[in-house]
Image: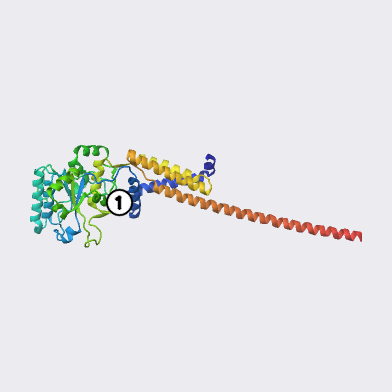
Amino acid sequence: MIRQLLDKGWHYWGEVVVVGALGIFASHLVGEHSPVWLTEVTQRIYQFVSNLAPHEPSPGDITVVLIDDYDFWSGPFDRRLPLRRDYLANAIEKACSDHPAVVAIDLDLRSPLTDGTLKDNDVYQAETQTLADAIAIQAAKGCSIVLPATTYCPEDPKVFCTVDSTIFSEHPLDDPHIRWGYVNLPEDLRKIPAQVHLANHGRLDSFAQAIVHAKDPERYQRYLKTEGSFSYGMFVSPHVYKDWHRQMSYADFMATSDEDLSERFKAAGIVMIGGGWHVLAVNRGVLVDQHFSPVGDISAIYLHANYVASILGGRTVHRLSKVVNILVDIVAVAIIAIVFALRFSGLKRFITIVATMLIMFVVQYLLWQNAGILFEVLIPAIALFLHWVFDEEREVRKRLAESRDAGAQAGQQLADCQAASEDVRKRLAECEAARTQMGG
């Protein structure tokens, strides 16, 4: 085997080093600025691996209350944006009266102008006052409430984030049972949003972190210390919430008796209220605040719910640090390059490549499930495969050229032989003529 590798020559291995290095660089570059199609492929692979986990997917301790098509288009919300805040107040009062651990609102509560110069439109101020009063009263009774914030974070990492003004700017909500978490989603939706640094030198939790903080402060502190800035979540689709009876429409939620809800919240102590209607009409257009996730197109409320369930359930996956990730990439690239360089017959080569891919997949799965480690070598592997195809095609061209040269050389030798034979025949003829003449 070593002889086969050495026979490839320094020129080949120099190309492999360059191609592998470019593949690793491209992998990390794309990881930070991934095109849509590659993001979808990566997320589907990610979900496929996570689905192999031995645990049964579950929604955790969460009930999702959706403002669905009926609620928005033909129900109490009168297809109005901004949403009816007095009806949101009713939902908060009902949820808190049934004693869940946390009530979280994932809806747009920003001011019309994010800088706060227009805090609220006059026509909605009475509704805003009703909603603010409901939040303050329920928090004073001990109900933990998490509200949505929206941040603006410049691309320059030296510039800290700012928080957009909300409709509650003139309604102080400073009860310790009220927390804020930003609802902005990361570019890579697999990653659990982490704390951000604010321009006022403070920090702001993500929406998921704020919910975990309210539900389980000890788990929150452990998460921040060990995983808070680089962990990935594991996802379940909305139909799992339905199967586990952890999803309700706003209308059903408001119509359910307090006794039934209290029983439900004993098993699911977090209530998350968010949007789930279609933007054009009933069942037409995309879902409001829809995003492509590892489990397909879903509303943002389910992304936040999955982040919360991942943290509380310990179902997080760690991305390797850059240095370790590069070292792992180099080892993986070296193994792939060696496999491609070996000379086997067609079937043996195919079996070897497939076996190598399976071994790497098993290693990734074991690291994922037992150490929570994720690494990706898709782009370097593709680059090396293309280089292998190019090298094989180059070898074929070389052999064809050598065959043509050998054929031409053989043809020339045959022509020379024929010419020599003809010359010999002429001389024999001359000798025979001379002998005949001498005999005469």
For the residue labelled by badge 1, is the local secondary structure a helix, a strand or a loop?
A: loop
Number of dots carrying numbers: 1
Residue 249 position within the rendered picture, expressed as x and y whole percent measured from the top left: 18, 54
Q: Is residue 13 toward the left or the right of residue 57 in the image?
A: right
- Reply above or below: 332 against 279: above
- Reply above or below: 410 against 20: below
Q: Is residue 402 toward the left or the right of residue 340 in the image?
A: right
Mark 1 neighbour class, 10 Å CA radius: few under 14, some 14 to 19, many 20 or more: some
In which quadrant of the rendered image does the C terminus lie?
bottom right
| Residue at figure coordinates x 52%, y 42% from the top left | 5
* Amino acid found under the numbered disc labelled 1: Val
| Residue at figure coordinates x 53%, y 44% from the top left | 9
Kindly tell me whether residue 59 is visible in this rendering. yes
Kindly tell me whether residue 206 is visible in this rendering. no
| Residue at figure coordinates x 48%, y 49% from the top left | 388
The residue most toward the right is 440
Residue 291 position within the rendered picture, expressed as x and y whole percent measured from the top left: 27, 54
Toward the viewer: 374 or 285?
285
Q: Is residue 439 toward the left or the right of residue 72 in the image?
A: right
Residue 67 position within the rendered picture, expressed as x and y whole percent measured from the top left: 18, 55
Query: Residue 120 falls in which quadrant of the image?
Result: bottom left
Q: Which residue is mark 1?
A: 295
Toward the viewer: 12 or 364?
364
Query: Residue 401 falls in which quadrant of the image?
Result: bottom right
Residue 319 position within the rendered picture, expressed as x and y whole percent measured from the top left: 32, 42
Toward the viewer: 142 or 37?
142
Q: How is the image coloured?
A: rainbow
